[in-house]
Image: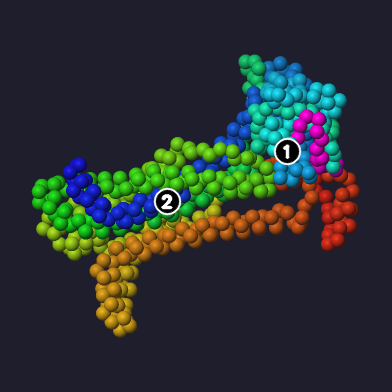
Amino acid sequence: MKALLTFLSWRHWRHHRLRAALVVISIALGVALFTSTEVAHSSTVASFEAAAKRAAGRAVWQVERARGAGVTADVLARIESDGRFDAAPVVEGTLALPDLVDEGRLLVRGLDLVRERKLRELVPEEGSRIDLATLWKDPTALVIPRAFAERTGLDVGDTVRVGTPAGLRTLRIGGRVEDRGAASVLGGRIAFVRIEGAQALFGREGRFDRIEVAPNAPGADAQALAAAVGDAARVTPLVQRDRTLDDMLANVRALVVLGVIGLLVGLFIVYLSVAIGVVERSRAIATMRTLGAPPRALRTTLLLEAAILGTIGSVLGIVLGWLLARGLVGAVDATVNRLVRLVSVDRIVLPSHAVWIGLGAGIGTSLLAAWWPARRAASIPAAEALRPAVLGTRLLPRYGRSFVAGLAVLAVGAGLVFGVQLKAPPWVGLGAMALLFLGVALLLPQVTIVVSRALRTPLRRWFSAEGFLAADNVLRYPQRSALTVVALGGALALMMTSASIVGGFHEATRTWLEVALPFDLSIQPARLTSTIYSGASLPAGLEKQVEQVDGVATAYGVRAVVQEL
């Protein structure tokens, strides 16, 4: 086998480096597009889950009511009376920073400092201090993370202007903590206050947004917690992805279709390269057959060389995909956080399944593309292998049958494309796309023959001998010409698909905005949550002030509350 690889494969590809590079690049392109999409998706999910776990600490469940309703202190008393749980109430809201525009918004979490220590701990920054006197006297004094303090230059005792639901206020910095646990989420754009201060800032006196709960005894599970809470609220896992995030990531993951198209283009390029290489090595194949090389060994050699090129392309594609993902992650981060703040992607994750799928897809595509020419080359007698023209003809399928098969495959693919709803599983759309490519590839050889014959006379009339020879050359090897057209068409399809996906996202978003938000501008309290309508309140009389602005036709207030059934 080693001798066959050296004599038959290595010598050939060494003299046709450009074609070998084309095979490797075509596989690498498809694998890179798939890998970059998976890396971007996995990095976003991993960052969200890591941030959620850091923020949760020991907490496992949250007790809450529908958005806008809030949880009262009697629910907290029920949980603590059970004796098997540690619980801490939380009030959250978002403050605008008019003097620190680059920081955007600041998530403020109101905590019960006594109960909070049972679930997680805020570590004071080394060399800094917590101004206990300020925190005791002023419940709205902020405790900020080191990262936020270093970016803004704020220190203990300084003041900062913030925009609250009731208007502008000036708050004092009461302490700085290390960027650990809950203080490390959202890139440090988070601050902590006493819970009564948060209730005052956001107009939620007597209510908590939620109660976070951790078990502290045997038998403390979700069912026991639900029994302790009763009908007053609901119990849900604390670390869970929001539906809005899942919807955004589903759109991002749809870009994997570009990788599939790239691999399909690579399939035809590999097939064409291997088929041409077999014809060019006809004498070498005949020599090996004459010396007694079994057909199986020749077939295995040709498949092995395709697998080697596919492996190189796959590894290159994975590396390239990881590099592309570094740019794509920024776009994903901006996409999922455009309307609401959900997650800050702070690290790149290359999942093992993306590596194995990328390797399998690249190598599998190479083997699939090389299988037909390898099988045909191994079955040709040595005498026929000495004549390249005969070998080239034997390598090609019967065009009439392939034309009929292509029509059938194309019909099935088109039926799936136009007959299946957009909500169908992703594999249905990918299968339809593969069938369309395969159908066109089966159709084109016969179409190429018909078109070439029809153009021979006009081309001879217009371009003399050059035109006739061009049409005749295409006619002699219709399969090669057809696959070249398919590869070119696949590249163009890749561009059109990219434009269609982006255009579809844009149009769907525009339509949704027109239907869901029937206004031109909205004024709402800044809030880093996963809802369009904030649950916080606005100052009374704001509608009349807005209507007095030149150019405003009408203004109205919206209060959205989800009622549990």
* Magenta stretch, residue numbers: 154-167
Q: Earlier in the sequence, mark 1 or mark 2?
A: 2
421 and 187: which is toward the camera: 187
Residue 209 is drawn in which quadrant?
top right
Disc 1 crowd, CA 10 A, few/some/many (<14, 14-19, 20+): few
95 and 229: which is toward the camera: 95
- Find disc 2 in the rendering and name its residue: 30
Q: Please, what secondary structure does the residue beneath circle 1 have?
A: helix
The N terminus - image quarter:
top left
Disc 2 crowd, CA 10 A, few/some/many (<14, 14-19, 20+): many
Q: Position of residue 389 (x, y in %)?
A: 19, 64
Q: Residue at x 26, y 75 (%)?
A: 469
In the rendered view, would you say 316 is above or below 18? above
Check residue 152 in the rendering and tell me which mark sits there, or answer none: 1
425 and 547: which is toward the camera: 547
Q: Residue at x 45, y 41 (%)?
A: 354
Q: Is residue 394 visible?
A: no
Check residue 427 in the rendering and tell me which mark sits there, or answer none: none
Q: Rounded to the nearest whole Å, what is the CA distance between mark 1 and mark 2? A: 44 Å
Q: Amino acid at mark 2?
A: Gly
Residue 312 is drawn in which quadrant?
top left
Q: Amino acid at mark 1?
A: Thr
- Lateral position of residue 249 relative to residue 23, left or right: right
Q: Is residue 509 visible?
A: yes
Q: Position of residue 205 (x, y in %)?
A: 84, 32
> Per the image, is 106 magenta?
no
> Per the image, is 165 magenta?
yes
Q: Position of residue 308 (x, y in %)?
A: 30, 45
Q: Position of residue 198 (x, y in %)?
A: 80, 32
